């Protein structure tokens, strides 16, 4: 039996002991995962799907730590393939509290190379810089351009189940989403790609990175995915580095930042 109770974090241990006395299970899901950790899971989503088998130790550890409920475990185990099981786990984790990422790392005892990859990506994760209605450091002419087919495909790879509210926030309808699902009943990524291409075709010059950024924020999705789309897979294109303005100019880009960290854009 699972009893969901909203309590302050500092009261969790006392509540856990109280519930245990009555044969109840305490599930810790205080808030959501940090944006940086969501970004890491999203950026390595395909790698995790290919390298991690969640059946066994991973699921049992996350259940033991209260990250997953019994319903979550049963739902994941019911998936037909190992890939689908991992993908569903990755969809669930971001909503299971700020400690879910660390618990997931601890669950990867049988996959030490995957844990190392996640920890490295977490250290290097680009945290979105404050900006009013744009993405810090990206020139206006780029923000006012439309994403290419390749960039839309990359966006579909990085988005999870939040893609539907994102599409709706961009001005598309539930009917549009239904048609995309009907056209690709067994391929979620193809559903997403068609939805964003429909958005670009319908809104023309207004279908820009700027409007896409607003849509991601409105849908409470991680807007930093656009930084990866615009900069591609070249780590030197956008990455916190300790370099000088001369290096930035030599890369044909821009210099900005503070506290010894800068970002370089190459166009």
Image (spheres, grey):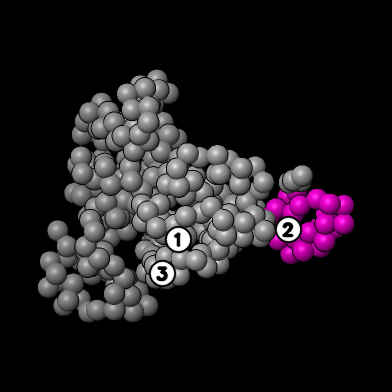
Residue plotted at (83% across, 57% down):
20
Question: Label 3: few (<14), some or many (≥20) within 10 Å?
Answer: few
Tally the marks: 3
Extent of the magenta region: 5-28
Residue plotted at (65% across, 42% down):
71
Q: Residue furthest right?
A: 21
Gap in angstroms between the C-alphas marked 2 and 3:
35 Å
267 or 62: which is nearer to us? 62
73 or 133: which is nearer to us? 73
Taking 52 as reference, is 84 above or below it?
above
Mark 1 secondary-structure assignment: helix
Residue position marked by numbered label 1 in the rendering: 36
25 drawn magenta? yes
Residue position marked by numbered label 2 in the rendering: 8
Quarter of the N terminus within the rendering: top right
Gap in angstroms between the C-alphas marked 1 and 2:
23 Å
Residue plotted at (35% across, 34% down):
187
Q: Quadrant of residue 51?
A: bottom left
Residue position marked by numbered label 3 in the rendering: 113
Question: Label 1: few (<14), some or many (≥20) within 10 Å?
Answer: some
Mark 3 secondary-structure assignment: helix
Q: Is residue 144 visible?
A: no
Residue 111: give x, y in percent of width and height: 46, 66
Residue 205: give x, y in percent of width and height: 20, 34
Q: Earlier in the sequence, mark 3 or mark 1?
A: 1
Gap in angstroms between the C-alphas marked 3 and 1:
20 Å
Residue plotted at (67% across, 58% down):
64
Q: Earlier in the sequence, mark 1 or mark 2?
A: 2
């Amino acid at each position: 039996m699972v009893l969901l109770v909203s309590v302050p974090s500092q009261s969790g241990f006392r509540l856990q002991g109280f519930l245990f006395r009555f044969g109840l299970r305490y599930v810790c899901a205080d808030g959501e995962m940090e944006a940086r950790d969501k970004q890491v899971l999203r950026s390595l989503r395909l790698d995790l799907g290919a390298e991690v088998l969640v059946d066994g130790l991973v699921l049992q550890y996350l259940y033991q730590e209260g990250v997953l409920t019994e319903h979550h475990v049963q739902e994941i185990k019911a998936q037909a393939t190992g890939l689908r099981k991992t993908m569903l786990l990755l969809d669930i984790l971001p909503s299971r509290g700020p400690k879910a990422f660390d618990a997931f790392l601890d669950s990867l005892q049988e996959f030490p190379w995957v844990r190392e990859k996640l920890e490295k990506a977490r250290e290097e994760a680009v945290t979105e810089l404050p900006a009013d209605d744009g993405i810090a450091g990206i020139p206006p002419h780029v923000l006012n351009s439309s994403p290419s087919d390749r960039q839309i495909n990359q966006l579909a790879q990085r988005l999870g189940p939040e893609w539907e509210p994102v599409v709706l926030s961009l001005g598309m309808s539930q009917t549009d989403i239904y048609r995309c699902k009907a056209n690709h009943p067994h391929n979620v990524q193809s559903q997403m790609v068609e939805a964003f291409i429909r958005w670009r075709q319908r809104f023309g010059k207004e279908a820009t990175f700027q409007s896409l950024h607003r849509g991601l924020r409105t849908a409470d999705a991680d807007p930093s995915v656009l930084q990866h789309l615009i900069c591609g897979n070249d780590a030197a294109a956008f990455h916190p580095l300790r370099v000088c303005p001369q290096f930035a100019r030599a890369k044909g880009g821009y210099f900005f930042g503070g506290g010894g960290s800068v970002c370089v854009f190459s166009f």
